[in-house]
Image: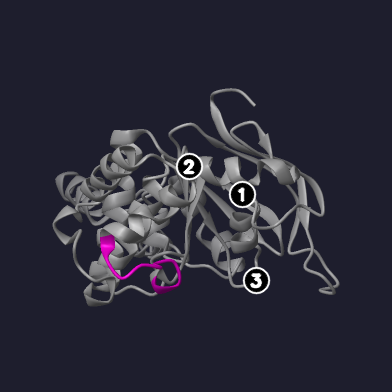
Amino acid sequence: MTSENRIITSGLSYAYPEAGKFAVHDVSMRVKNGEFLAILGHNGSGKSTLAKLFNALYVPSSGNVWVCGLDTRDDDLVFDIRQHAGMVFQNPDNQIVATVVEEDVAFGLENNGVPAPEIRLRIDEALRAVNMEKYAKKAPHLLSGGQKQRVAIAGVLAMKPDVIILDESTAMLDPSGRREVMNTVHRLNREEGISVVIITHYMAEAATADYVIVMDEGEIAMTGTPREVFSKVEKVRALGLDVPEMTDLAHLLRQDGVDVRADVLTVEEMVEEVCRLSSNT
């Protein structure tokens, strides 16, 4: 693996015991250094299984996964792999283990034998990075869903990973909580250079990514930038997914003969298109 890539898979397949078919089949892909990657797919498409293979929670049935050059098939490397690639799960209550926020962030560090002065520094840095430093002494059960998820992210950040993998981590949150988490991971990606892989069924979240992979029946069905993928509205829908609202509106307008761009993603871009059309009339 070169320094340009954080995760590489080659011919990756995985079958659950006695399932009778592959949950992930012959997937070759990569996550680049500093990239924000969204992985989409309908329920059962293999996207969450893929995330767990990235983190060495599952071992490939065939093929390989390399995380920062480390082969996930090697049992002796699992500890190191999970330091490089941290996972944030769907339900923060399943990931938070302590009764005080700062103690929860310290949990992984203490288990790894990090010296106490270093632990203190990392706790403070991680909570500051997710804007939760003023909640350090609070009990997690008193926090909102979005705040809990940010604490879970802080716990991963304290381990200083190269990649953060969010496995439908906003699925149980309200719109405000989803916005909190997405703003946090985008800032970490932008300012800290941490690669982000987000498994999501929210198309608006995927639209903010650098690159999109769409899974179907365990295989890669589509790849490209959000504009490239979502502009193929009919193909995306045939895979059981939707497109961002403004892309859908652009698609309907084009069907009615209105000359708007097919790759509109945001409200701001649609406003620009409307203004352009108005100025030409």
What SS does tag 3 mark? loop
Q: Is residue 274 left or right of residue 112?
A: left
Instruction: Tell me the kind of residue under disc 2.
Output: Val
Q: Earlier in the sequence, mark 2 or mark 1?
A: 1
Q: Quadrant of residue 137?
A: bottom left
| Coordinates of residue 68 in the picture (x, y in percent) | 59, 33
Residue stretch in magenta? 93-101
| 223 to 237, vertically: above or below | above
Q: Earlier in the sequence, mark 2 or mark 3?
A: 3
Whether residue 94 is in magenta: the answer is yes
Q: Alpha-carbon neighbours of circle 1 within 10 Å: few (<14), some, or many (≥20)?
A: many
Foreground: disc 1 or disc 3: 1
Instruction: Tell me the kind of residue under disc 3.
Output: Gly
| Coordinates of residue 188 in the picture (x, y in percent) | 32, 42
Residue at the extreme top: 2
Q: Residue at x 35, y 62 (%)?
A: 253
Which residue is disc 3 drawn over? 44
User: Could you tell me which quadrant the N terminus lies in?
Assistant: top right
Q: Is label 1 in contact with label 3 (beta carbons under 8 Å)?
A: no
- Residue 54 disc label: 1
| 148 to 210, vertically: above or below | below
Q: Residue at x 52, y 40 (%)?
A: 84
* C-alpha gap between disc 2 and disc 1: 10 Å
Which residue is disc 2 drawn over? 163
| Coordinates of residue 53 in the picture (x, y in percent) | 66, 53
* C-alpha gap between disc 2 and disc 3: 24 Å
Name the residue nearer the viewer: 163 or 242. 163
Colour treatment of the image: one colour
Instruction: Tell me the kind of residue under disc 1.
Output: Phe
